[in-house]
C-alpha cells in the first residue's frame, strides 16, 4: 500500500480532521452499534481499499471538476475522513452510501452524512457502514481538474466508535491512513518522442509542382 509522506503542516491538518471525525462518531455512537464483544474482531485493524475517478463536467458548471470516490472496508465503521492534500474542495455530496459491485444501493439503512469547511482541504463523514465489503461511494468537486499535475491523491482514515466493557465505556478506534490513489481515468501525458511523432504527422505533405509538359500539335 502506498502512503504519502506528510510535512508538519499536513500532519496538523490531518490530525484536526481525525479529531473532528472521532467526535462526530461518538455523537452517533448510540444509534450505530452496541458492545463489540467478539474477541477476534479488532476495530483498530480495519483495512480499507478504494480509488477515485474524475467525472465529466456539468456544462452548467464549467468551473467545477467533479470527483467520485469509492472504497470498501473489511469491518464496520462509523465515520471516515478524506484529506485532499492541497486540492481545495468547492462542493461535497452530503450523503455517502454503500452500493454493490454493480452500483445498486444496498438496503439496510447504512448512510454517511458528509460535510466540511468549503472551500477546504478535507471531508468528514459520519454515520453507519455495517455491510462490510459494500462499496461506499460519494463525490466532491474541485476548482481544477483532478488530473492536473500534481494530481489529486486523497488520504483516508476511518473511525469506529463502539461500547466496550461492563459497565459499557465509549471507545473509538482509528485505522489508516489509506491512499485512494490518483484518478484512474486520467490520460497520461505524451512522451517527447510521441510529441515529435505527432508533430511530423500534422505537417502537410509537400507535393512537388510538376512542370507543364508541352503538347505537340499534330
Image (cartoon, rainbow, N blue to C red):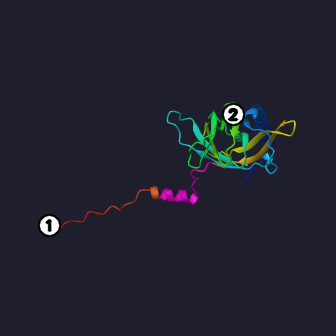
Position of 12 with respect to 208 (left or right) is: right
| Of residues 218 and 85, the one drawn nearer to the viewer in this rendering | 85
Q: Residue 34 at x, y = what percent?
A: 77, 38
**Is residue 180 visible to us here?**
no
Position of 21 with respect to 216 (left or right) is: right
Q: Measuring 17% from the left and 68% from the top, which residue is drawn there?
A: 216
Q: Residue 110 at x, y = what percent?
A: 65, 39
**Category of crowding for the residue at label 2, using alpha-carbon neighbours closer than 10 angstroms: few (below 14), some (14–19), many (at least 20):** some
| Residue on which the image places disc 1 | 217
**Category of crowding for the residue at label 1, using alpha-carbon neighbours closer than 10 angstroms: few (below 14), some (14–19), many (at least 20):** few
Task: Tell me, for residue 116, which label it has, or none.
Answer: none
Q: Residue 33 at x, y = what percent?
A: 75, 38
Residue range highlighted in magenta: 183-200
Q: Measuring 80% from the left and 47% from the top, which residue is drawn there?
A: 38
| Of residues 129 and 181, the one drawn nearer to the viewer in this rendering | 129
Which of disc 2 and disc 1 is earlier in sequence? 2
Amino acid at each position: 500500500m502506498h502512503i504519502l509522506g506528510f510535512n508538519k503542516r499536513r500532519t496538523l491538518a490531518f490530525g484536526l480532521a481525525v479529531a473532528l471525525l472521532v467526535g462526530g462518531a461518538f455523537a452517533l455512537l448510540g444509534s450505530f452499534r452496541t458492545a463489540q464483544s467478539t474477541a477476534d474482531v479488532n476495530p483498530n485493524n480495519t483495512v480499507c481499499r478504494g480509488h477515485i475517478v474524475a467525472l465529466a463536467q456539468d456544462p452548467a458548471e464549467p468551473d467545477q471538476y467533479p470527483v467520485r470516490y469509492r472504497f470498501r472496508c473489511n469491518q464496520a465503521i462509523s465515520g471516515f475522513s478524506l484529506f485532499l492534500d492541497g486540492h481545495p474542495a468547492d462542493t461535497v455530496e452530503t450523503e455517502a452510501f454503500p452500493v454493490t459491485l454493480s452500483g445498486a444501493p444496498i438496503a439496510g439503512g447504512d448512510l454517511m452524512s458528509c460535510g466540511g469547511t468549503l472551500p477546504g482541504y478535507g471531508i468528514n463523514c459520519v454515520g453507519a457502514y455495517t455491510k462490510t465489503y459494500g462499496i461506499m461511494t460519494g463525490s466532491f468537486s474541485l476548482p481544477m481538474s483532478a488530473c492536473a499535475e500534481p494530481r489529486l491523491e486523497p488520504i483516508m482514515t476511518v473511525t469506529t466508535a463502539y461500547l466496550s466493557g461492563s459497565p459499557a465505556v465509549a471507545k473509538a478506534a482509528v485505522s489508516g491512513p489509506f491512499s485512494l490513489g490518483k484518478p484512474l481515468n486520467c490520460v497520461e501525458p505524451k512522451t517527447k518522442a510521441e510529441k515529435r511523432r505527432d508533430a511530423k504527422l500534422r505537417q502537410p505533405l509537400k507535393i512537388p509542382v510538376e512542370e507543364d509538359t508541352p503538347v505537340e500539335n499534330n
